[in-house]
Amino acid sequence: MAGLISCKQIIVLMAAGLLPLQARAETLVDVELVIAADVSISMDREEKRLQQEGFARALRDPEIVRAIQGGSLGRIAVVYFEWGGEKQQRVVVPWTLIDGAASAHRFAERLERRSPAKFLRGTSLSSALEKAEELLRQSGFSGARRVVNISGDGMNNKGPEIEPIRRALIGSGVTINGLPIVYKGLLEGVIEGPDTNADPKSLIGYFEDHVIGGPYAFVEPVVAMQNYAEAIHRKLLREIGLPIYSDLKANGQTAAIEAEPPAPKP
């Protein structure tokens, strides 16, 4: 019949990217993973580098690749963006299908080619979660699980209130996991004075009470600068491989690791 598009023509148009997003079939994956990396003013250049390298290194690790391939479909979708103050976000690597070592390595290489941004106006976890929600809506993938992996070295001090945004994400079935950076004072790098040395455990508690949520949500603190890569690896492995979850609380969340920074060597 004139005016109708055949299935073959639809496939050709989809491959060429000429159909609107709504008209494209979503690719099924085990996990849609949003990595939201803090690059706010309180994060110095070395910390940003360690964070970026930690994610790149983890995605190249054979154990992570095996976890990806061990899922029901053997593939996940990942996007990596950086965030700082209100309306300060930058997508570094867009949504990418990872189904083995080759695609994982390509993602890591794309990540490493970009220098971390420097955002100067505050810490807006709430705006970062808004951006994560937007990216999930526009992903083009359909995951059995949807996870936001958000790092941060401070509490929300810019942008909208965090609770309504967090609640909306959780209500839509998304799990938010936290990577609080707790080896320094909450205001170190922002102001000078004795108040910069707040108890790091207060940030863990803040993430547990006000940031994370959803099925099997957990925090994985970075307790020392040299532990970035190890913490990121553990967190990704846990998010990708659901059977790895353990020590669940009655409310479905895991307790933060009760760990202290290692004592300095004499």
Image (cartoon, helix red, strand yellow):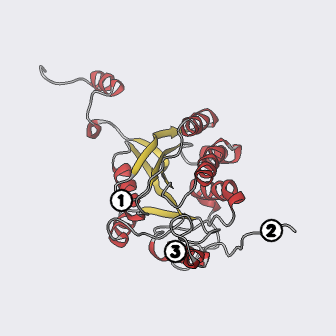
Residue 146 picture location, percent across and down? 45, 55
The answer to whether mark 3 and mark 1 are in CB contact below 8 A is no
Label 2 and label 3: CA atoms lie apart by 28 Å
For the C terminus, the image quarter is bottom right
> Looking at the picture, which amino acid does disc 3 mark?
Glu
Q: Which is more N-terminal, label 2 or label 1?
A: 1
Tell me if 159 is positioned left or right of 265 in this view. left
Q: Nearer the viewer, residue 99 or 222?
A: 222
Query: Mark 2 highlights which residue?
Result: 264
> Looking at the picture, which amino acid does disc 1 mark?
Glu
The label shown at residue 208 is: 3
At x 32% / y 22%, what residue is drawn?
12
At x 67% / y 67%, what residue is drawn?
223
Residue 169 picture location, percent across and down? 37, 63
- The mark closer to the camera, 3 or 1, is 1
Asked which quadrant contains residue 205, the reply is bottom right
Tell me if 138 is positioned left or right of 257 in this view. left
At x 61% / y 69%, what residue is drawn?
182
Q: Nearer the viewer, residue 112 or 138?
A: 112
Q: In this view, which residue lies farthest toward the front?
A: 192
The label shown at residue 138 is: none
Residue 229 picture location, percent across and down? 68, 53
At x 59% / y 35%, what residue is drawn?
109
For the N terminus, the image quarter is top left
Which element type, helix, strand or loop, lies under badge 3?
helix
The label shown at residue 86 is: 1
Tell me if 121 is positioned left or right of 182 in this view. left
